[in-house]
Image: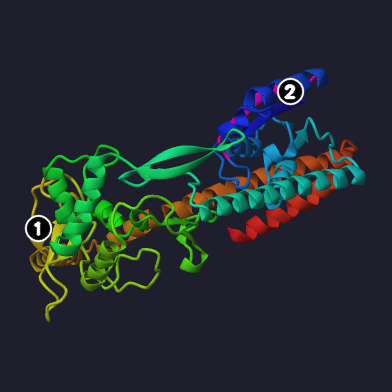
């Protein structure tokens, strides 16, 4: 039997233990050799969790199994949880592989689901694995929550002005805490807060002055308005430890409600006073109507700068963005298209100033009007619309082509199995496979 090896570890720490990739491969190779199986492919996944199917090597393996000339008859893993820890994904992908005549075999949980008892055992093993993973995640989170409540660090890079230090707690245990860093960084943090609170300077102006003075950022780069803004709203600088602010379990991080945050006062030495921090928050609300509180999700009005992101600065290549001189005037202030690099990092990054939005939009509008009139006069508008429509829907066209290929492949597989059944060569499970494939074919035909 021709097989593929699939091995996976989710972390470097796990790789140091018995489930390391070399150990998995060695055990699987020995098992295949004893069985007389031929290993034709290897799919090695490093540092990828099995809670999701978003794994490059896993998807390559599935794609190979779906090919019409697939060389595989089975995928061999060390344990079923190496294949997937999520029951929904396991059921889906094992069924998908079965449709293409490919089995999933575990060398330590040996069951090929040939009988109802084997199917029950395999299902129990998978449920136990998923329970273990969910329970382990719960226990880890409990530990991290307790750790945060005590003011210890759960990982991550400390903000500018702090360093990570490990303290001994006995029994060879250590905890990570944040301590003030270099004196120059501490002075810079205090200067930033004072400039914003009392000197009336905006984020980009503070960033520009730091770049002019050649003050390096935490990573040795240049300062930007975004970096300054993050510092102004970071409660770390008043000795407050905040954890559990964002949800990392779902795709696309989202802010949790503040009531869910784990907040610990006096978790580490403060760099600035609470009075100075509060003054900066008051100033920010006056200038930006509370816009600095990034965890608040609210609907935003449409931007008046309809060309933002389309134009590029001819000096540095950064996209142009909209900017207003003031929002407190009756007219709303003068609006400009400004180089994004200049706005974020100052004139040291780019000397560009800006264009009045009325003038830029007038030029673009006139150009569009002229182009449209020319197309109408030359009777080319319909052709341009057709080309645009084809370009916008090219992905749909590609999907339709792929769907047609899958339908053709299914039809051939169904025909082969039906011929085997008529000639008496079919296996006991072929009727079930045939029913599933016919159902899938019907579904795909309805989607064409």
Quadrant location of residue 201? bottom left
Image height check: is 196 above or below 341? below
Which residue occupies the foreground of this view, 10 or 311? Answer: 10
Of labels 2 and 1, earlier in sequence is 2
Image height check: is 21 above or below 390? above
Provide the residue span drawn in magenta: 36-48
Q: Residues within 10 Å of mark 1 (few under 14, many from 20)?
A: some
> Is there any visible trace of residue 313 in the rendered image?
no
Q: Looking at the picture, how far across and down is residue 305, in whole percent?
A: 20, 66
Q: Looking at the picture, how far across and down is residue 411, in whole percent?
A: 70, 46
Q: Circle 1 — which element?
A: loop
Which residue occupies the foreground of this view, 341 or 182? Answer: 182
Image height check: is 277 above or below 269? below
Q: Residues within 10 Å of mark 2 (few under 14, many from 20)?
A: some
Could you tell me which residue is drawn at 74 percent across and 45 percent down? 129
Could you tell me which residue is drawn at 68 percent across and 51 percent down? 134
Name the residue tied to disc 2. 27
Could you tell me which residue is drawn at 29 percent across and 66 percent down? 278
Which residue occupies the foreground of this view, 38 or 297? Answer: 297
Name the residue tied to disc 1. 354
The magenta stretch spans residue 343: no
């Amino acid at each position: 039997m021709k097989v593929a090896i699939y091995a996976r570890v989710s972390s470097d720490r796990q790789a140091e233990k018995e489930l390391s990739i070399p150990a998995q491969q060695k055990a699987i190779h020995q098992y295949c050799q004893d069985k007389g199986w031929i290993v034709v492919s290897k799919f090695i996944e490093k540092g990828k969790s099995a809670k999701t199917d978003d794994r490059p090597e896993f998807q390559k393996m599935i794609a190979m199994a779906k090919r019409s000339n697939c060389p595989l008859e089975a995928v061999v893993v060390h344990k079923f949880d190496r294949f997937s820890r999520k029951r929904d994904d396991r059921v889906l992908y094992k069924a998908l592989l079965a449709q293409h005549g490919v089995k999933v075999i575990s060398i330590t949980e040996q069951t090929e689901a040939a009988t109802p008892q084997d199917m029950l055992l395999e299902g129990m093993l998978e449920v136990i694995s998923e329970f273990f993973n969910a329970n382990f995640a719960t226990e880890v989170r409990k530990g991290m929550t307790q750790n945060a409540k005590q003011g210890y660090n759960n990982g991550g890079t400390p903000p500018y002005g702090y360093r990570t230090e490990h303290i001994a707690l006995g029994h060879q245990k250590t905890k990570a805490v944040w301590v003030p860093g270099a004196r120059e960084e501490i002075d810079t943090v205090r200067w930033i807060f004072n400039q914003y609170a009392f000197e009336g300077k905006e984020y980009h102006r503070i960033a520009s002055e730091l770049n002019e003075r050649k003050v390096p950022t935490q990573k040795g780069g240049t300062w930007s308005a975004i970096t300054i803004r993050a510092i102004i709203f970071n409660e770390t600088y008043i000795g407050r430890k905040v954890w559990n602010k964002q949800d990392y379990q779902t795709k696309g991080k989202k802010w949790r409600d503040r009531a869910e945050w784990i907040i610990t006062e006096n978790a580490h030495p403060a760099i600035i006073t609470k009075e100075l921090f509060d003054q900066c928050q008051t100033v920010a609300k006056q200038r930006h109507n509370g816009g600095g509180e990034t965890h608040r999700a609210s609907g935003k009005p449409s931007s008046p700068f309809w060309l933002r992101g389309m134009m590029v600065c001819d000096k540095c290549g950064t996209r142009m963005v909209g900017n207003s001189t003031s929002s407190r005037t009756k007219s709303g202030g003068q609006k400009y298209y400004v180089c994004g690099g200049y706005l974020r990092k100052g004139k040291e990054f780019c000397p560009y100033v800006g264009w009045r939005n009325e003038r830029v939009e007038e030029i673009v509008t006139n150009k569009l009007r002229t182009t449209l009139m020319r197309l109408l006069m030359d009777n080319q508008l319909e052709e341009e619309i057709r080309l645009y429509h084809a370009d916008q829907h090219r992905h749909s066209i590609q999907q339709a082509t792929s769907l047609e290929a899958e339908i053709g492949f299914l039809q051939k597989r169904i025909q082969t199995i039906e011929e085997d059944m008529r000639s008496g060569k079919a296996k006991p499970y072929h009727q079930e496979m045939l029913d599933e494939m016919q159902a899938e074919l019907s579904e795909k035909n309805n989607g064409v």
